Amino acid sequence: MAEAQPQRRRRRIAVEEAFATTEQFDALRVLVETTTEYDPDLALARHQVDGTYIKSRRLLDLEGERLQLMDEAGIDLALLLLTAPGVQMFEPRLAADMSRRINDGLAELIGRHPGRFAGLAVIAPQAPAAAVREIERAIGSLKLSGIVVNSHTDGEYLSEQKYWPILEAAEAAGAPIYIHPRAPTPLMAKAYRTDRLEHAIWGFQAETGLHGLRLITGGMFDRFPKLQIVLGHAGEGIPFWLDRIDLMHTRPRGRPALQRKPSDYFRSNFAVTTSGMNWHVNVRFLIEALGADRIMFAADYPYQDMDTEVALMDSAPISEEDRDKIYFGNAERIFGL
Ligand code: MN
């Protein structure tokens, strides 16, 4: 009798796994306590920093329960990102200094657990010159795997000219920029507030999808053709709209001219992840719309459970070849893991 085939052990990399530091939480707590206007990001942060939010403990834990849950779920390597809104709400000097300390700590953590963690460098776009220096240091010296930006900074997107040096530095370093969600700006979030739609249920995606689209329509990939952007949450809605964006970009006239179709940039300068969106319908759609080479698995821990997301991707009705690309092949290539 033939022996049962041993179950194939496939490498699993999860690429949008959040953490926080006490320094970040302490600075957020100051903002929460001193800001009188309603702010959708601080409304979330209020729960994170007051000790009542169940996931805060998990955000702050890196070497305890997290590693155990990774083992239980079969996740070999987690790519860590400082949780939203990163350092982007702090005053520029503090934000730039904090980003260096956090990146140093991240590099040390990765060194203590070879093969288990990789990380994206946090930067402070509100201090563009310091952010450029930090990209060079974090990628060149600390060997971090890319950069995370939590969507808007003071209501502005990275396509604004003052942020171009950041895009240029990322391109030069070969470092992908992961545009992670945060809530829409307070002005935009007004329309979301009545039904509390400004967070992960809709507002994050509307905000971050707009940011990604503006990088395309603002001509950033004509200017920085090798720049690579990563979007979580199945591409923040853009893949579903791609065909219509191409059609409507040509009318009415008056937009800045692009050398290529919007979808061409999306297919060559973007990758998407399945963070919190491992719904099989999405996974199949993304493969059809973008091809399996542009999709990476993410669990979005601790906001989602690792074992649930792994079970979804393990059971997705896709080819084993595509599942390998999504679980590890693409992340190895795109983030150099
Ligand atoms: Mn996330």
Image (cartoon, rainbow, N blue to C red):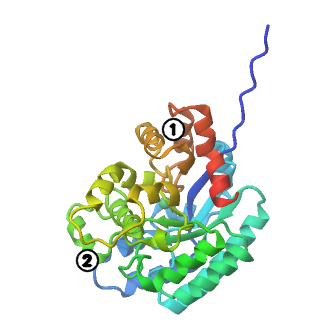
Q: Which mark is residue 189?
A: none
- Amino acid type, mark 2: Leu
Of the numbered discs 2 and 1, the one sitting upstream in the chain is 2
- On-image quarter of the C terminus: bottom right
- Pointer 2: what residue? 187
Q: Nearer the viewer, residue 3 or 318?
A: 318
Q: Nearer the viewer, residue 176 or 61?
A: 176
- Pointer 1: what residue? 312
Q: Residue at x 78, y 59 (%)?
A: 114
Q: Position of residue 115 (x, y in %)?
A: 75, 56
In the displayed structure, 136 sits above or below 59; it is: below
Q: Could you tell whether 323 is left or right of 209 in the image?
A: right
Q: Position of residue 21 (x, y in %)?
A: 59, 73
- On-image quarter of the N terminus: top right
Q: Nearer the viewer, residue 90 or 130?
A: 130
Q: CA distance from mark 2 to mark 1?
A: 37 Å
* Tag 2 secondary structure: helix
* Tag 1 secondary structure: helix
The image quadrant that residue 200 belongs to is: bottom left
Q: Could you tell whether 330 is left or right of 40 in the image?
A: right
> Would you call the spot at circle 1 few (<14 residues within 10 Å), some (14-19), or many (20 or more)?
some
Q: Residue at x 37, y 64 (%)?
A: 213
In the displayed structure, 169 sits above or below 66; it is: below
Q: Position of residue 277 (x, y in %)?
A: 44, 47
- Amino acid type, mark 1: Leu
Tell me if residue 296 can be seen: no
The image quadrant that residue 219 belongs to is: bottom left
Residue closest to the far bottom: 93
Q: Residue at x 49, y 74 (%)?
A: 223
Mark 2 CB lies closer than 8 A to ligand 1: no
